[in-house]
Amino acid sequence: CAPAAAVTSGLAATLVAGGHPAERVLPLLALMALMAGALQALYGLVGLGRLMKYLPYQVVSGFLSGVAVIIAAGQLPVLLGLPRSAGLLGVLAPGLWRWQALAVGATTVAAVLLAPRVTTRVPAAVIGLAAGIAAYAGLAAGLPELRVLDGNPFVIGSLAGVPALAYVQGRVGSLLTLGPADLGLVAASAVTLSALLSLDTLKTAVVLDVLTRGRHGSNRELVAQGLANMASALLGGIPGGGTMGPTLVNATSGGRTPWSGFFEGVLALVAFVALTPLLAWIPLSALAGLLLVVAARMFDWSTLRLVGHASTRFDFVVIATVVVVAVQVGLIQASVLGTALAMLVFVREQASTPVVLARRDLTRAGSRIRRPRVARELLDAHGDDGVVVALGGSLFFGTTDRLFDELSTDLAARRFVLLDLRRVAAMDYTAGRLLGQMASQLSERGGSLLFSGMPAPGSQVAAYLEELGLVGARGSVPVFEHQDDALEWMEDRILDACGYEEDPHGPPLPFEALRPVRDLSPEAREALAGIARQVHLDAGEVVFTRKEPGQTLYLVASGAVDLELPLKAGGAHHLATISRDDVFGEMGFLEGRTRTADARARRDSVVYALERHAFDALAHRVPEVAEVVFAHLATEVSHRLRRADKELRALEGR
């Protein structure tokens, strides 16, 4: 497992450089492995498996690419057969290269890369290792020094055998010699390794889900892997994870259940026990070749393309920074930096997400109250005094400055600013303070800030606004459950400022004073009054329902009637409110088809009903009645279509 090899070797080098004797290094490495496994199990138990899947890919890519560079830097000198004292700089000195090691390593790499073209039944790594061993054997046939095990720098060398039970007892005994102070020596490495193994495993699990059309349990995987790594540490092994290469080999070779991994482990154990004498002859450069192929495949080469696009250069900087810190400083520091960069990436993404979804003034977004023509003309002339702003996403310190910039013109020129908060997911203190400043700025000019679509009481957004004194018992900002109610409130204030007087609770208008009746001649007006039927409606009373047959036209003399569209999930969608001196039911009256909506009295109302059959009979005798009434209905429908067209254009241009 590459992450385990990198972290373990890095910790071992650090401990040796720190003056720790060899007999203490191995127990400390075992302690690190034990802690890493315990941490993995803990991640799964507390549910962090789900959270790890949300780590930005830039950080994950930087981690894995950094580990790949560390592996390559450690194995390239081995591939070239350099003396241990030469270090990585020896790569630049061809005079130090040993052609025997290079030949074996190159053969191994070539075999690994070419093997899939020949067969996929045998893993490429197995073929590559076999090719490397065969190449070494071929060289040894002509070079006697390669046939000697002792002091041979090209092979693993003799492995001292220890009885299994005695080895386990020795490992456990060495762990018991450690004290609490030793935990600090390996804690950071354990955290780093546990995170790397968990990330590698979960990343591989996601890819495996696609191949097998399954769905893994991230927390369950971490608990199982953590327990297995703890057992491995006690038995003398090193931690492992679900690395991509072996997993894909397993899946493409026919493995479909966890049993395939189990039997792979059993066979590896059998090979280790039965073939221990042969393991000593495995060429080091062959193993280095295998690891270099792993490193090359682990490195995320696609990130290099990010440099060529301005929109992705910041992502490249994040990845490159994690890689550089991992290589030059250490994986521990890279993990800390990666977490910080993950937060930075999150803030950057959130800050770049638009929070102003739409903005319309009252000339393009009116309430559903059908007002008299005079009122509509006044609202068209002064509708820019109010604006509706739909907000969305997260309002926090990263977006407040842009929000204020986008609304600065409205705050300076409008009397009323309505903020629709239905799509706001979260809010912080900075955003709440900004809304308070907006409310104060509008109030100083005699205007008002309004909220509609407030989240449910007790939500994070509602709590912030209440704590700041903007809403609730101490609140100064009007709050409306529905946007239409807020629009009606603003329209009423604008009409009041224009001197328009309308008493919705006044006495019923006489029939002859209603539109279009008042445009008729006295004789026609009297004739139409003869077929009109006065109806008194109580608040909440249903006039007609959707899909109900009806050809009656209603003229509202007082009160108001709501037109609603029933919803399948329950409740109703408010279409319009018909106020005094207006009409409704014109669709059924004109077409003779079923009703398209429900009509319900908003408050106590008086309406006049005109039946179509009686109206047609009267129109034959008095044609003026049909001419005036139909002309009025056509004009009203035209006005409503123009209004709807204006609102649709505003929605398309948001």
Image (cartoon, grey):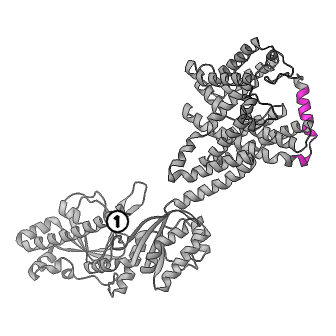
Q: Nearer the viewer, residue 476 or 616?
A: 476
Residue at the front extreme, as displayed:
95
Residue visible at 59% across and 22% down in the picture: 114
Is residue 155 toward the left or the right of residue 506 in the image?
right
Q: Give coordinates of residue 579: x percent, y percent.
A: 31, 75
Find residue 240 and report its image quarter: top right
Q: Magenta part of the protein: which range?
A: 166-182
Instruction: Tell me, yes or no, if residue 123 can be seen here.
Output: no
Q: Nearer the viewer, residue 81 or 49?
A: 81
Find residue 166 and report its image quarter: top right
Total marks shown come to 1
Residue at the left extreme, as displayed:
621
Q: Specify the quadrant that holds the N terminus.
A: top right
Which secondary structure dominates the residues rendered in magenta?
Answer: helix
Residue visible at 53% across and 44% down in the picture: 305
Residue visible at 32% across and 64% down in the picture: 649
Residue 175 lies in the magenta-colored region: yes
Residue 501 lies in the magenta-colored region: no
Q: What is the three-letter code of the residue carrying label 1?
A: Ala
Find residue 116 and report its image quarter: top right
**Mark 1 element type:** helix
